[in-house]
Image (tube, rainbow, N blue to C red):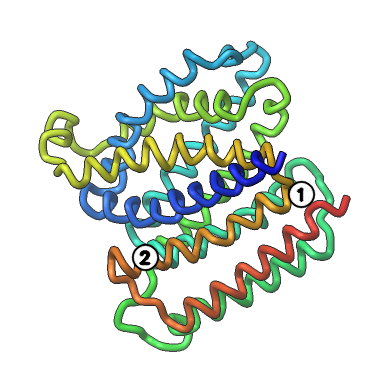
Amino acid sequence: MKEHRSQAVIALLITMLIWGTSAVFMRTTALTLAPENALALRYVVLVPLVVLGLLTTADSRIARGHWPRLIVTAIGMFGSSWFTIQGFARVAAGLGTVISMVEPIIIALLAWVALREPLSSRIWAGLFVSLIGAAVLFWPDITAHPANPVDAVGILFLLAAPTCWAIYTIGAKPLFSHYSGFTITGWSMLLAAPLILFMASIPYAELVSTTSHRTWTEIVYLAAFNSLLGGVLWNYGSRHLAGAAVGSFLYLLPVIAVAAGYFILGEPVTPWLVAGGAIMLAGVALAQSGSHKH
């Protein structure tokens, strides 16, 4: 058991490193190719890998009665992918990751609306604290006219992304008792793929031939490591550690993303980013501590 726990910790640390640095590559590929083209090329790499994985998965066949719910998860998958890449094209990688960390609160609120799951006082308090953190985070933009203001549309996109992921999470929840996490995620990706591939703004022959080797490396990293390996390692860690312990690893994400943004892209690390991000994460932690008190 101790060996499994140690391996689970290592798996989750690697996952956080992959997911944290991926924010940088989402931004660089989106700026280099345009967001819709970067996402389309990622799915060009991702789809064959997912198909191969599903062909070797024992529970990959979906019962007819589960397809309507799976379509809902695919809608959530598409929206999450689309809004994330659009958001990172407009907002710095570190800041964007901090904003996206409100996802657990959005999931709790959507579950309250859609599933009538009760909300504890800690979730409401966590939401309030996170709003204070957001005010601190964007205080320079609120009170002055900075030289490089944060793109409001990008912020809305990065808030829409976890909302769509909440739709995926809530839609997929009943399916996990019948299928593996990879099966649900894989089929959701495949169902979302046609629309993502259709929305490329440049013919694929031109897009493939004009994309640099460096950008291809980043795209393969996002497809193979961020989307697939990260999910596999996360599921392994979740299987061998308690839920609260697993969730605590997520607080490394903004730290890694901010550091990666600083060292790779030269993104500034301001006191407002550090203070506001810390308060927002405290709010998310408070909300999560109250999400299991039912």
Furthest residue in direction right, as rendered: 294
What is the quadrant of residue 43 in the picture? Answer: top left
Quadrant assignment for the N terminus: top right
Amino acid under disc 2 = Ala
Q: Which residue is mark 2?
A: 92
Q: Nearer the viewer, residue 288 or 250?
A: 250
How far across and down, in percent of the image, does residue 61 sit? 58, 12
* Element class at badge 2: loop
Q: CA–CA distance between discs 2 and 1?
A: 31 Å
Residue pictured at 53% horizontal, 34% vertical: 232
Q: Which residue is mark 1?
A: 112
Res 194 visible: no
User: Against 144, is 95 above or below?
Assistant: above
Residue in the foreground of this view, choosing between 238 and 45: 238
Give the mark nearest the N terminus, 2 or 1: 2
Residue sitting farthest toward the bottom: 144
| Residue for point 50% across, 47% down | 15
- SS class, disc 1: helix
- Tag 1: amino acid: Trp
- Viewer-nearest of discs 2 and 1: 2
